[in-house]
Image: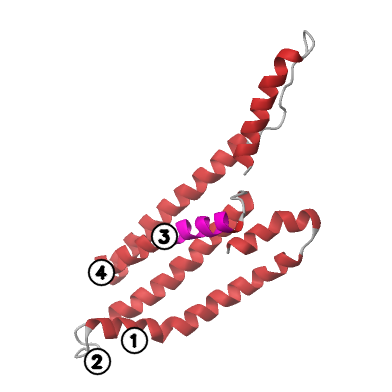
Amino acid sequence: DASALVKSVRERLDELAPGLPPGVKVVAFYDRSALITRAVSTVEKALLEATVLVVILLLLFLGDIRAAVVVAVMLPFAALSTFLLMRFTGMSANLMSLGGLAIAMGMLVDAAAVVVENAVSRLAPDAPGAHLPRLHRVFAAAREVARPVAAGILIICLTFMPLLTLQGLEGKLFAPVALTI
């Protein structure tokens, strides 16, 4: 946790300052705290913008508020579950893992839009099987596109697998991207 590390370094430097010789002071020439704050802020902003944009586009193209809400609610829950899994596995939310989360959000929006669009078309009054119960039609619509959507996501995830084979500094830098995705 880079933020906690920067905070504890500052606290320790403040403790050491009174014991330094007169005229000597420690001046930080590289402080990542502003960068970390900006990165987290950027992810929050991107998540909010993506949610609003998805809702607007789904409303424009599908004309169904429930479809838009389903996709919009999915994004924060996906981010929350990602952060919970990262915490559970001991993975820190660094700049690279946040970048991976941004890529994954794009994949999730794409997949959700495909599933929701198919469900909306199956729920139309003139759609085949309109006599079937609503829940059955939604399940059939999701099942119909589940394999192609999952295959697309799997292909994208597989392209990031080589990052997990990197060792040393490169591995420490780029593995969080692949693991977050």
Q: Give the number of the mark in front: 4 or 1.
A: 1
Secondary element at image label 3: helix
Residue position for label 3: 77
**92 w.r.t. 14: above or below:** below
Q: Residue at point 68% right, 20% down? A: 15
Residue position for label 2: 129
Report how far apart the C-alphas of labels 4 and 3 lie in the structure.
21 Å
Report how far apart the C-alphas of labels 3 and 1 lie in the structure.
24 Å
Callout 2, which amino acid?
Answer: Gly
Callout 3, which amino acid?
Answer: Phe
Secondary element at image label 4: loop
User: Which class describes the residues within 10 Å of circle 4: few (<14), some (14-19), or many (20+)?
Assistant: some
Image x and y of residue 84, in percent: 50, 56
Residue contact at pointers 3 and 2, CB within 8 angstroms: no
Asked if one can make out residue 107 in the rendered structure from this viewpoint, the answer is: yes
Q: Residue at point 54% right, 81% down? A: 151
Secondary element at image label 1: helix
* Quadrant the N terminus occupies: top right
Chief SS of the magenta region: helix
Callout 1, which amino acid?
Answer: Ala
Q: Residue 53 lies in what quarter of the image? A: bottom left
Considering only order in the chain, which callout, 2 or 3, is on the residue closer to the N terminus?
3
Image x and y of residue 157, in percent: 60, 71
Considering only order in the chain, which callout, 1 or 3, is on the residue closer to the N terminus?
3
Callout 4, which amino acid?
Answer: Asp
Residue position for label 1: 140
Report the magenta residues as a range.
77-88
Report how far apart the C-alphas of labels 4 and 1 lie in the structure.
19 Å
Considering only order in the chain, which callout, 3 or 4, is on the residue closer to the N terminus?
4
Q: Give the number of the mark in front: 4 or 2.
A: 2
